Image: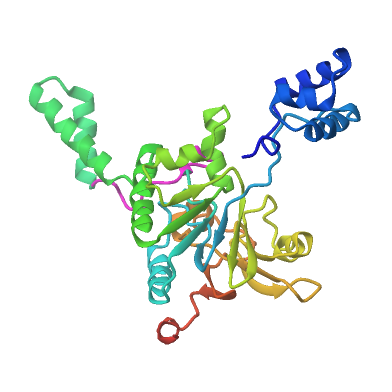
Amino acid sequence: VSMNNREWTEAELARLSSMRISEGKSWDDIGKQLHRSGDACRLKFGEIKNSHIQESSLPIFNQPLVLEGDALVLPDVEFPFHHAEFINKCIDLAAQWGIKNCILAGDVIHFNSLSSFTPNFASPEPVLPTEDFRLLNNLLEKTTTPKEYKQMEDIIRRIDGQTRVINLETEMMQASREMRRIGEVFTTIDWVLGNHELRLLRQLEHSLGADRLIQLFGLQGNWRIANYYFSILVSGGEEYQIEHSYDSSKFLSASKLASKFLRNILQAHTHHLSLAYDKSGRYICAQIGMCSDERRMPYATARHNGTDSHKLGAAIVRNGYLWLLHEGVDWNSLHKLP
C-alpha cells in the first residue's frame, strides 16, 4: 500500500486538522510529517473540513456469503428431523453432475428442545411392557434391599434407552454427525442462518458471531457461515439469492424479493414448493420446499390444521440454470443427463 492509499487513522486526521489550523505550515511540510504527499493532505483536509456530521461507527451489513460456481441447495434440513432418503437422492445427483458446492439454506438444526412450541412427544408405542411397569410400581413402594434397587435401576435404564424424546445434547450430537458427513462430500458448504438457529442464539442471551456455530459443531475449514439470513450464488453468469427471509407467507415470497433485489430468488423457510417469474419476467422466483421429515414432528402430524401441506424439495443450480428437485422428479433420467 502506497503512502497515499493507506487508510487514514483517527489520530492522523486529528493531527492533520490541528497542524493546518494552528501551525500555518504548507501542505508539503504537513505531508512530510504525516508521511504523505502534500496534495493528499490538502484533499483529505477539504473532506473533513466540510464534514459537519461524522460517519457512524456501526458496521454496514453488506458482506453476505458469495459462492461462485454450481451448487446443491438444501433448505430446512432441521437435523435430526431430516428426511435422509430425499437428501441422499439430492446428494447422489449432485455427485453425478460433478457439483462440488452445497448451500444449507437455513434451519439446518431443528433445536426442538429450545422451541417455544409444545415439546416433542415420546414414541406413541408403550415404552415398556405392562409387566415392567407393574414391577417398577411395586419396587417404588417397597424398595429396601440392594437387589431391589438394582432391579429398579435396570428398568429405568430400559426406559431411558427406549424413549424418543430428545434433549439438546442428543440433538446437537446427531446434527453434528450428519453435518460432518456432508462436509466429506462437498468442497465448500455455506451455512445460511435461519429462525431455528436463532433459537440457540437467543438462549445464549448475548451477541454471538455465527462463526461460533461452526466451532460448536466441530466442523472443518470447508464450512462457511456469516451473520446473514441469505447468501449469493453466482453460476454461469447468473446471480441467485438464497433466502431464509423473515416472512414465511407463501404470498410474499420469492416474487417480491426478486423484484426488490433484482436477482433470481431461491426461497427457503416457507416449506412450500413453487416456480414462477417476477412481474418483469426476468427473474426466477422459486420456493424450494424443505428437507425435513414432518412425520417426525408431532406439531405437524399429531394435531391437524387447515394450512397447505408442506413439500419436500431442494435445488441444483448448474451453469446458471435452475433444477428444482422434489419427490416427483425422474431421478434415473436426471442421472443420465451429461
Q: Residue furthest top?
A: 22
Residue in view at x 24 percent, y 32 percent = 137
Give the camera-side residue of 312 and 233. Answer: 233
Residue 136 in the image: above or below residue 18:
below
Residue 234 in the image: above or below residue 207:
below
Give the camera-side residue of 154 and 308. Answer: 308
- Report the label total: 0
Q: Position of residue 123 (x, y in %)?
A: 36, 50
Residue in view at x 53 percent, y 56 percent = 300
Q: Position of residue 18 (x, y in %)?
A: 82, 16
Give the colouring mode of the picture.
rainbow
The boundaries of the magenta stretch are 112-128
Q: Is residue 177 left or right of residue 279?
A: left
Please identify the quarter of the rendering in which residue 142 is found.
top left
Q: The N terminus appears in which quarter of the rendering? A: top right
Please identify the quarter of the rendering in which residue 171 is found.
top left
Give the camera-side residue of 39 and 14. Answer: 39
Q: Is residue 124 on the magenta stretch?
A: yes
Residue in view at x 38 percent, y 67 percent = 88
Q: Is residue 202 on the magenta stretch?
A: no
Q: The C terminus appears in which quarter of the rendering? A: bottom left
The answer, for residue 23, to whether it is visible in the render is yes
Residue in view at x 77 percent, y 62 percent = 256
Give the camera-side residue of 20 and 216. Answer: 20
For the stretch drawn in magenta, the main secondary structure is loop
Q: Position of residue 211 (x, y in %)?
A: 49, 40
Q: Is residue 73 left or right of residue 177?
A: right
The answer, for residue 117, to whether it is visible in the render is no
Q: Position of residue 115 (x, y in %)?
A: 53, 40
Residue 123 in the image: above or below residue 93:
above
Please identify the quarter of the rendering in which residue 12 is found.
top right
